[in-house]
Amino acid sequence: MTLTYVKRLGAIGSFKFVLRHRCERPARVTSNFKRVVVLLLFGLLLGWGHVNRAAAAPLRLGVLGDSMSAGDGSDFGSYPNWVTQLTKSGAFSVSPIGNQAVGGAVSTDMVNEQLPAIQAQIQAGQLDYTLVMIGANDAAYAAADFLTNGNLTGTVQSLVNTVVQNVTFTLNTIAHTGSVHQIVANIPDQSVAPLVKSLFTQYHATPAQIAEFKAGIQLANSEIAAFALRHNIPLIDMFAATDSIIAHPPLRLAGVNFTNLFAADGYHPGAVADGLVANAVINAANRQFHAGITPISDQQIVRNVGRVPFILGPTYYNMTPYVLLAVPEPSSWVLAGMGALGVVIAGSRRKWLASQ
């Protein structure tokens, strides 16, 4: 055997060694790939089932609150408030008993009269979600009190203590009653509602007094937000939405300008604004709980108030800035992806150990 032949044999042997190991890798990779595919398909099935559930069977929503949710006022007979528009979209169903909101209710009424009925429905397995939207009347009555009795500081502090205590108690009670997803809304900025502004003018409230009243609402809202987000409950920022959208028209949706976003009574949000509130509920459900619900289009909101959209769309007004999100529950895709990554890492580590 010549030296040249030995070198060639050695080269061929080395080539066969490399070829053999390279040919074995696809088998291992294929095995790992199959595991990854199975995990991803499993995640897809879970995710598809969740989305289909929202699409095929509307999610059952229980509502606690006041006339912002129940509907009240001079033009509310045919007025599609946010609950009406939400159910019309097919995303949620709200039964008459599921909507416990009552016009004129304050947060203490919610605890004493509405919460027990919602608890009973949760225990009977009749609800998937609950939404608490209360405090507007507490704030309005507080404004009337300080304008008549002059005790602004005491009135504001009472407002903060009462609303925060009642809202957090309600959220905590629901959490311990049964398995439902919770959403909460904070107190809207009632200082910008035309009716409340007229009261300020009538009773000669100073800018400093109005600012202190507004700061009291913000203080209550900050405490509600801290509790909600600490307990993974998404929060609809009605205060910010009132301040930046409802109180500052015009709002342009689907090519149509709306110059007044309050209802005719000057107190409640109008139907267009309520369409956006409905989308904030959907936004919270999608981003926090992966509900997979299609929002209400701008075009549909425009049609809901009897107008004709100029832009066909669909287009969607962005309500994400008005939904404060807690740490989201991991989706099926995330769990499947984490599992797939673990398989790949484990497989790579085994191959590395085998080669040592």
Image (cartoon, rainbow, N blue to C red):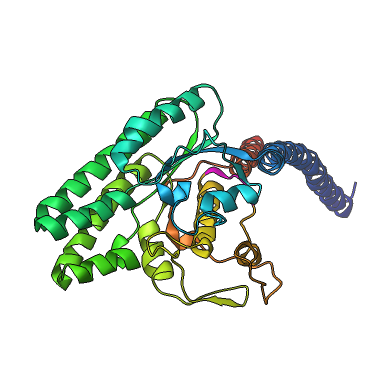
The residue at 68%/66% (across/down) is: 314
In the rendered image, the vertical position of residue 248 relative to residue 139, given as above or below: below
13 or 206: nearer the viewer: 206
Estimate the x, y position of residue 10 in percent, counting from the top left.
Answer: 82, 48
Estimate the x, y position of residue 319 in percent, counting from the top left.
Answer: 50, 61
Image quarter (top left, top right, bottom left or bottom right) of the C terminus: top right
Estimate the x, y position of residue 91 in percent, counting from the top left.
Answer: 63, 46
Residue 157 left/right relative to 254? left
* Residue sitting at the far top: 124
Q: Specify the segment rendered in magenta.
A: 289-293
Magenta stretch mostly in which secondary structure? loop
Q: Quadrant of residue 17?
A: top right
Q: Is residue 325 visible?
A: no
The residue at 71%/36% (across/down) is: 42
- Residue 291 is covered by the magenta coloring: yes
Estimate the x, y position of residue 128 in percent, counting from the top left.
Answer: 55, 34
The residue at 44%/61% (across/down) is: 269
- Residue 306 is covered by the magenta coloring: no
Residue 335 left/right relative to 40? left
Residue 141 left/right relative to 231? left
